[in-house]
Amino acid sequence: MPYLAALLAGSAPADGTFVSLRMTGGFTPYRLVHWEVLWRKRVAVANHYCALVNVDEALTDMRLVPTDEFEALLAGLLGDGALELRDAPAPKVHVGAQTFEVELVIDGRSNVFKVTEPEAQDDPTYARVVDRIERFVTDAVGPMPFKNAFFDAGAFGFLNITAVPVSRLFVDGRDTGLDTPVYGYELPKGSHVLRLVGEAGEREHTVKIEGGMTTILHMDLR
């Protein structure tokens, strides 16, 4: 049964359905960025992965996605004709332009295509598909904190913090814009004041960050 018909009939996506977007080149501090949503065993999982130049440890985070939201993403991609797109022609000026690879498996049909500088393509479908996938995963998982690859590794450390219930993270009085759990958050080595704000109230904690190391912290605000 075609996916749109199955969706209207109330059928769930087939096991192994997935949507993948990879940024593989261009002027960027990352050597690879991957946005992915995979459906398996009646659960959709969004994954955001970033690998930086000169940094061995990658940044990655994932979240469960409501079924109806994943189905809306699939329907949108099918409406864009994403399964029929082929490799896009290279734009005339593409020095430093970002290059993406899109891979889709929907309703037993698959497609893989590449596009450089989607916004510069004559066919606006490429930009629409890339933007749709990137926005969906970023909205589901949250923005990935930047890890600086251009300073002495000993000058910075990293923070993994979880909290119950979910809370907004403030560092040294600044709103990070991130809700817990937060992984791989880069900070200069030394002491920092963390403040978590959530439904159960707020709490402060001073943490010492060691250069080149990851500090793991769990806080219970209940």
Image (tube, rainbow, N blue to C red):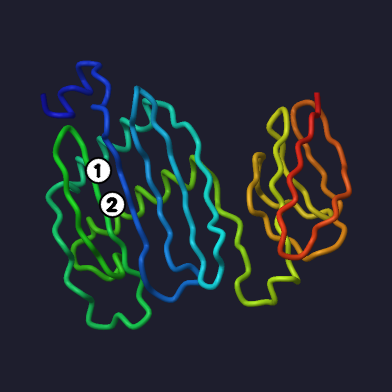
The residue at the point 35 percent across, 58 percent down is 22
Counting from the top left corner in percent of width and height, residue 216 is at: 73, 45
- The residue tagged 2 is 129
- The residue tagged 1 is 77
Q: Is residue 81 above or below residue 186?
A: above
Q: Amino acid at mark 2?
A: Val
Q: Secondary structure at mark 1?
A: helix
Counting from the top left corner in percent of width and height, residue 209 is at: 80, 58
The residue at the point 41 percent across, 44 percent down is 136
Q: Residues within 10 Å of mark 2 (few under 14, many from 20)?
A: many
Q: Secondary structure at mark 2?
A: helix
Counting from the top left corner in percent of width and height, residue 42 is at: 35, 22
Q: Which mark is residue 101?
A: none
Q: Amino acid at mark 1?
A: Leu
Q: Quadrant of the C terminus?
A: top right
* Dot 1 and dot 2 residues touching (CB under 8 Å): yes
Measured in 3D between alpha carbons, the distance from the residue under mark 1 to the one under mark 2, in whole angstroms, is 7 Å
Q: Residues within 10 Å of mark 1 (few under 14, many from 20)?
A: many
Q: Nearer the viewer, residue 64 or 9?
A: 64
Counting from the top left corner in percent of width and height, residue 43 is at: 39, 26
